[in-house]
Image (cartoon, rainbow, N blue to C red):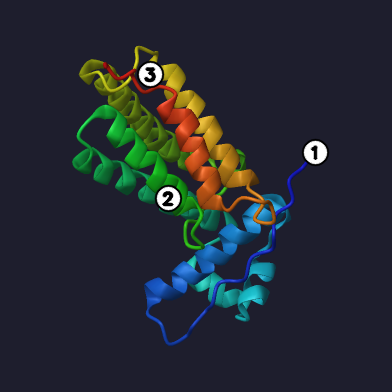
């Protein structure tokens, strides 16, 4: 059974804004359409129409639809890396750092400017761009595995395989970002907190009496 999503509003294209803000508006609308319709069914015409601008105006900021898709991933990866940097600095234990990261990443994914696009759409990118994204994904994956190992070493996490844990988290987090239905009984924040409780607190080491 597929999970239907509530249609979201188009990004606002304000011609009085600076270059970066206008570019971000186009990117946000592209991400919204990629999520709702899939990359193959999206068009520059549809993105321009939704923003009430001309097709050449979109091409002024982006060379083609593939660049739009790639930049959606870059922006989402930037948010994830920033969240991991902050969590690493602010957390005191491996468990705390992981929880700070997962919560920040999930909440970023719920915001209109997150530009989160399903990973399966990467197949539409040329090999060189996929390789760039893969390098970034592997780098963050390795950092997360190191945090799990750190949590095991400091006693905040029970013994486990960091590779299995990080892979399981990635699948679960991807599911909620792609499949959350805002018409359901729980808000995104509530679902995120339940997921965090299952993913992280289930791994927490037992406290000694």
Residue 170: percent from the left, percent from the top?
49, 32
- Counting residues from the start of the chain, the first of labels 2 and 1 encountered is 1
Residue at which label 1 appears: 1
Where residue 74 is drawn, which disc sits there? 2
- N-terminal label among 1 and 3: 1
- Would residue 122 be visible to someone looking at this image? no
| Crowd tier of the residue under label 2, counting other residues whose Cα lies within 10 Å: few below 14, some 14–19, many 20 or above | some
Gap in Å between the C-alphas at discs 1 and 3?
32 Å
Q: Residue furthest toward the right? A: 1
Kindly identify which residue carries mark 3: 162
Q: Is residue 1 visible?
A: yes
Residue located at (34% from left, 15% from top)? 158
Residue at left 34%, top 18%? 206
Element on which disc 2 rests:
helix
Vertical order, 65 against 148 (above or below): below
In front of the other: 188 or 40: 188
- At a point 61% along the width and 45% down the height, the residue shown is 178
The quarter in which the C terminus is drawn is top left
Distance Cα–Cα, label 2 vs label 3 = 25 Å
The CA span between labels 2 and 1 is 31 Å
Which quadrant is home to the N terminus? top right
The mark nearer the N terminus, 2 or 3, is 2
How far from the left and from the top, in percent, is residue 79?
Answer: 37, 51
Quarter of image, res 22: bottom left
> Which is nearer the eye, 111 or 22?
111
Q: Residues within 10 Å of mark 3 (few under 14, many from 20)?
A: many
Residue at position x 58%, y 62% in the image: 30
Numbered disc total: 3
């Amino acid at each position: 059974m597929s999970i239907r999503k509530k249609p979201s509003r188009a990004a606002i294209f304000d011609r009085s804004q600076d270059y970066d803000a206008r570019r971000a508006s186009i990117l946000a609308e592209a991400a919204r359409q990629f999520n709702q319709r899939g990359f193959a069914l999206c068009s520059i015409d549809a993105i321009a129409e939704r923003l009430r601008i001309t097709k050449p105006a979109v091409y002024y900021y982006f060379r083609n639809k593939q660049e739009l898709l790639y930049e959606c991933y870059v922006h989402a990866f930037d948010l994830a890396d920033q969240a991991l940097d902050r969590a690493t600095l602010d957390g005191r234990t491996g468990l705390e750092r992981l929880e700070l990261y997962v919560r920040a990443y999930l909440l970023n994914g719920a915001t209109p400017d997150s530009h989160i696009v399903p990973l399966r759409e990467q197949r539409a990118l040329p090999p060189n761009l996929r390789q760039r994204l893969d390098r970034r994904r592997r780098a963050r994956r390795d950092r997360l595995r190191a945090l799990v190992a750190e949590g095991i070493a400091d006693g905040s996490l029970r013994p486990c395989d960091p590779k299995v844990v990080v892979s399981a988290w990635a699948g679960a987090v991807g599911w909620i970002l792609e499949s959350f239905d805002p018409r359901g009984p729980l808000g995104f924040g509530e679902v995120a907190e339940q997921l965090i409780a299952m993913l992280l607190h289930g791994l927490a080491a037992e406290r000694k009496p």
